[in-house]
Image (spheres, rainbow, N blue to C red):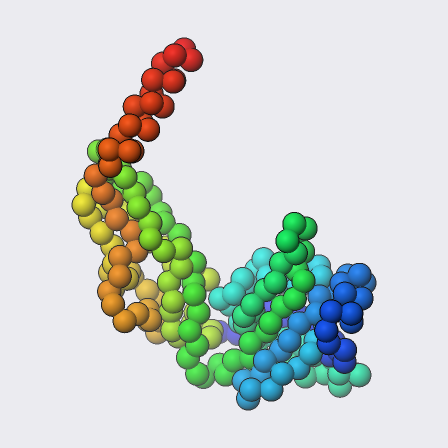
């Protein structure tokens, strides 16, 4: 498997609120590249290419970070580690890039996608999801973008735990205790009351 995506960035000198604010005003996003050897490199990226690559790779897929240091270009495999978002505008304020060794395992929180409608829900049960991500361990290029969990066969009182989740080859879940990921439970009195109230309002509306 090869790395398909590349983000071009430029090494920067200044740090702190002042220089970072000036970069953002120019449509640039300040960031830090943490190398696999533990070094910190200050970088800046154009907003649009960064947003596009993040849409594609998220925080789970490796891409190449191409760093231009006054004309000297170096390329490193990285993951996006942390993103600081603007409080109300749709833009990034700061990004941390994490350098990886393609032959060493990394741990990443991978999004879960629940697929299908549980049999128990059709019978009146309530689906309860306890986690939005699973922490997985694998070599960087083996890490999946998401984990699909098919809940179609889940009956009332059924639970899928982390050890039940089917993972791709060479990928394993990281956990100390075998925790529940999703369950179908009997509706509580509050659920039944809310459902009854909703049905009453719907009937009155008609």
The residue sitting at 44% across, 69% down in the picture is 108
- Is 96 left or right of 182, judged from the image as shown? right
How many marks the image carries: the answer is 0
The residue sitting at 78% across, 71% down in the picture is 19
Q: Position of residue 153 (x, y in %)?
A: 23, 45
- Asked whether 202 or 78 is in front, the reply is 202
The residue sitting at 54% across, 70% down in the picture is 81
Q: Give the quadrant of residue 103.
A: bottom left
Whether 85 is drawn above or below 186: the answer is below
The residue sitting at 29% across, 28% down in the picture is 193
Q: Give the quadrant of residue 126.
A: top left
Q: Position of residue 165 (x, y in %)?
A: 28, 60
- Asked whether 84 or 122 is in front, the reply is 84
Q: Is residue 8 visible?
A: no
- Is 90 left or right of 188, judged from the image as shown? right
Q: Position of residue 184 (x, y in %)?
A: 24, 44
- Asked whether 60 or 103 is in front, the reply is 60
Q: Quadrant for the C terminus, please.
A: top left
Q: Position of residue 130 (x, y in %)?
A: 33, 53
- Is 121 left or right of 111, judged from the image as shown? left
Q: Is residue 61 visible?
A: yes
């Amino acid at each position: 498997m090869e790395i398909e995506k590349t983000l071009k960035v430029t090494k920067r000198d200044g740090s702190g609120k002042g220089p970072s604010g000036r970069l953002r005003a120019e449509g640039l996003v300040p960031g830090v590249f943490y190398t696999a050897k533990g070094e910190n490199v200050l970088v800046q990226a154009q907003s649009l290419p960064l947003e596009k690559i993040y849409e594609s790779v998220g925080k789970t897929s490796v891409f190449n970070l191409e760093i231009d240091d006054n004309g000297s270009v170096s390329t490193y495999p990285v993951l996006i580690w942390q993103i600081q978002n603007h409080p109300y505008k749709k833009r990034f304020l700061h990004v941390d890039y994490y350098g990886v060794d393609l032959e060493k395992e990394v741990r990443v929180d991978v999004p879960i996608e629940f697929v299908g409608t549980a049999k128990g829900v059709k019978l009146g049960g309530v689906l309860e999801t306890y986690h939005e991500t699973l922490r997985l361990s694998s070599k960087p290029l083996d890490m999946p973008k998401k984990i699909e969990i098919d809940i179609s066969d889940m009956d009332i009182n059924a639970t899928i735990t982390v050890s039940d989740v089917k993972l791709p080859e060479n990928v394993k879940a990281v956990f100390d205790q075998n925790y529940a990921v999703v369950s179908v439970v009997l509706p509580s009195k509050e659920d039944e009351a809310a459902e009854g109230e909703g049905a009453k309002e719907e009937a009155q509306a008609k």
